[in-house]
Image: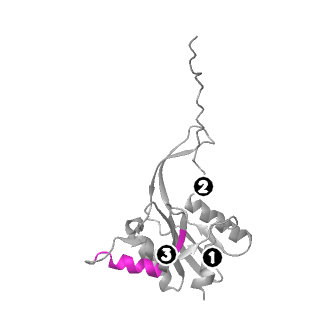
């Protein structure tokens, strides 16, 4: 009698990585909610201004925007007040292991952050280097250095990862708050 190997069904466990981690903005919003609920700071995500052009009304209680346009370019993602100081910042993510491209930042955002710093506000970027799962607070002054020199002969079109390691501030990722960026502000920017 010939014995044939028993064919077994191979069960491949599929893993769905969707929504495994929150987005950077969601992590910041969760942190901001913690800060607000514990009377630490009042910082909110700014809504993007849109102009509604067309709305569909399939039912009385089911209005649906079918066409809309951005009114004006948004400035930055977040703003608020901490210890009597105005705070304004944007969140950026990069998949690069070597640098954050300056093209991720828009000229109107630079103009806005410069206006904030001119008024003695605290302006910065929170940058997530996805390959390393590291979060940095980059003071606006360092951003401006690279931005203002990018068109020069030896100017860079990005901010090197090494600059983040040496001159920006690592933000710890935790449970409550998720991204404790106010600790960085306390330790380095309000001294």
Task: Report the disc number at residue 182.
Answer: 1
Q: Position of residue 75 (x, y in %)?
A: 47, 69
Q: Residue 159, relative to residue 48: is it above or below?
A: below
Local crowd at mark 1 within 10 Å, few (<14), some, or many (≥20)?
Answer: some
Using residue 24 as the reference point, say whether residue 118 is left or right of it. Answer: left
Sooner in the amino-acid sequence: mark 2 or mark 3: 2
Outermost residue on the left side: it is 153
**Secondary structure at numbered mark 1:** helix
Q: State which quarter of the image contains the N terminus.
A: top right
Find the magenta span and give its range.
135-151
The residue lying toward the viewer, choosing from 108 and 155, is: 155
Residue at label 3? 165
Q: How far apart, in angstroms, are the residues tagged by discs 1 and 3? A: 19 Å
Residue at label 2? 21
Q: Position of residue 117 (x, y in %)?
A: 49, 83
Q: How far apart, in angstroms, are the residues tagged by discs 2 and 1? A: 21 Å
The residue lying toward the viewer, choosing from 83 and 2, is: 2
Sooner in the amino-acid sequence: mark 1 or mark 3: 3
Q: Pointers 1 and 3 in contact (CB under 8 A)?
A: no
Q: Is residue 112 visible?
A: no
């Amino acid at each position: 009698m010939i014995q044939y190997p028993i064919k077994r069904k191979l069960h491949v466990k599929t893993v769905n990585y969707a929504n495994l981690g929150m987005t950077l903005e969601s992590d910041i919003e969760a942190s901001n909610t913690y800060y607000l609920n514990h009377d630490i700071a009042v910082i909110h995500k700014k809504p993007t201004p849109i102009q509604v052009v067309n709305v569909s009304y399939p039912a009385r209680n089911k209005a649906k925007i079918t066409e809309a346009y951005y009114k004006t370019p948004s400035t930055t993602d977040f703003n608020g007040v901490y210890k009597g100081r105005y705070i304004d910042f944007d969140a950026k993510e990069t998949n690069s292991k070597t640098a954050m491209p300056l093209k991720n930042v828009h000229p109107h955002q630079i103009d806005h952050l410069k206006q904030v710093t001119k008024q003695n506000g605290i302006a910065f970027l929170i940058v997530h280097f996805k390959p390393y799962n590291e979060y940095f607070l980059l003071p606006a002054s360092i951003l401006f250095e690279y931005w203002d020199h990018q068109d020069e002969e030896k100017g860079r079109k990005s901010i090197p990862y090494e600059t983040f390691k040496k001159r920006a501030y690592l933000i710890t990722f935790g449970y409550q708050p998720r991204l404790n960026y106010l600790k960085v502000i306390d330790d380095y920017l309000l001294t």
